[in-house]
Image (tube, rainbow, N blue to C red):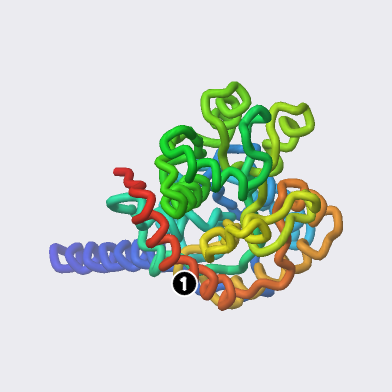
Amino acid sequence: MNAIRRTTWALAAGLALMSTAMAQAPAPAQDAASYPNRPVKVIVGWAAGGATDVIARVLSEKWSKSMGQSFVVDNKPGAGGIMGADALAKSPPDGYTISVFLSATLTANQFVYNKLPYNPDKDFALITHLTNGAVVLAARPETPYATAREFADYIKAHPGKVKYGSYGTGSFGHVIMAYIDEMQRGQMTHVPYKGETPLLQDLVGGSVELALVSVANSEQHVKAGKLKYLGVTGPKRLQALPNVPTLAEQGLDEVPLKMVGWTGIAAPAGTPKPIIDKLVAETHKALQDPAVQARIMGFGNEVVTNGTPAEALARYKADVPIWKKLVDLSGARAN
């Protein structure tokens, strides 16, 4: 009997181990035809209401309708997008967690922060480039310069007199202004804020003189006469502001001043290619919708309707060395 019991217990234990192993084994790779068959989480590393969040919500609505499953935005704001990127990096690579991200989260943060909880070169699969988002140089109406060129000349002639704000240490708005300051030896004072909303409050209130800001959040103040536009970054004028010249048109034509931030879609590294390909195709379809384009362009962004994973990766690789130089120049560092 003892032998029989031992044999029975051994069999039972073996079956239990097999069941546990089967439960823990990764699910087989899913093909594009059956994806998605349950809700998909869309991580945004910024608070609700900003341009990146709105882009994610507009696309999620389109994806939900076209693919027959819910795409649910999950905001994880904090530390310049790091919280959201970290959550994405630690998610299963099965297509059921993706992210709409802001480029600086991958490009700039690796140089601003002493240590990241993710590796931007290894932990993500870039799916597609979505938008280009230039920012606009906005100033208090009483400032003694009416253009970006006049501003640059003014700080050169009056070092130490100007105080500018940014929506965060190491942000695009910080490092580009630091670059202009270095070019002109302007000795400006930088005042960082935790986001664009408090920055604009103080800019309108007069605590700082000027800043690089988004069209979406600053245009109301310009229309009310509380701010004025001096110029826009990037290689061409914004469709939303056709009468505002670029910095390059005004003689500030160095490479960093022609850069723009951009948004894209990413998944955890190892996500099956058929799923990525399906997301690319469905995203292209959504971005062809004139209503979607109008909503995105209302934020001062320009839509990229045919981006590929290879192009998104190439854009990332091209931006990284420029961002390294800009962050080093600005001295932006955070723990």
Q: Measured along the vertical axis of the image, is residue 161 above or below residue 11? A: above
Residue 269 image position (x, y, % from top left):
45, 68
User: Going 82% across and 52% down the picture, which residue do you hit?
Assistant: 294
Q: Position of residue 61 (x, y in %)?
A: 74, 51
Locate residue 111: give its quadrant: bottom left
Q: Outermost residue, right direction?
A: 290
Question: Could you tell me which residue is drawn at 68 percent across and 56 percent down?
Answer: 246
The type of residue carrying mark 1 is Lys
Mark 1: give few (<14), some (14-19) or many (20+) Cα within 10 Å.
few
**Viewer-closest of 243 and 217:** 243
Q: Residue furthest front?
A: 157
Q: Residue furthest left?
A: 2
Q: Quadrant of the N terminus?
A: bottom left
Q: Position of residue 66 (x, y in %)?
A: 78, 61
Q: Taking 319 as reference, is 328 left or right? A: left
Looking at the image, the residue that sits furthest to the top is: 205
Residue 102 vertical position relative to residue 2 in the rendered view, above or below: above
Image-based side of 237 in relation to 88, left or right: right
Helix, strand or loop under label 1: helix
On the question of residue 82 being in view, the answer is no
The residue under the point 59% across, 52% down is 42
Q: Quadrant of the C terminus?
A: top left
Residue 232 % position (x, y): 66, 51
Residue 82 placement, left or right of 216: left
Q: Which residue is mark 1?
A: 317
Kindly tell me whether residue 261 is visible in this rendering. Answer: yes
- Residue in the image at 41% along x and 51% along y: 182
Q: Nearer the viewer, residue 14 or 67?
A: 67
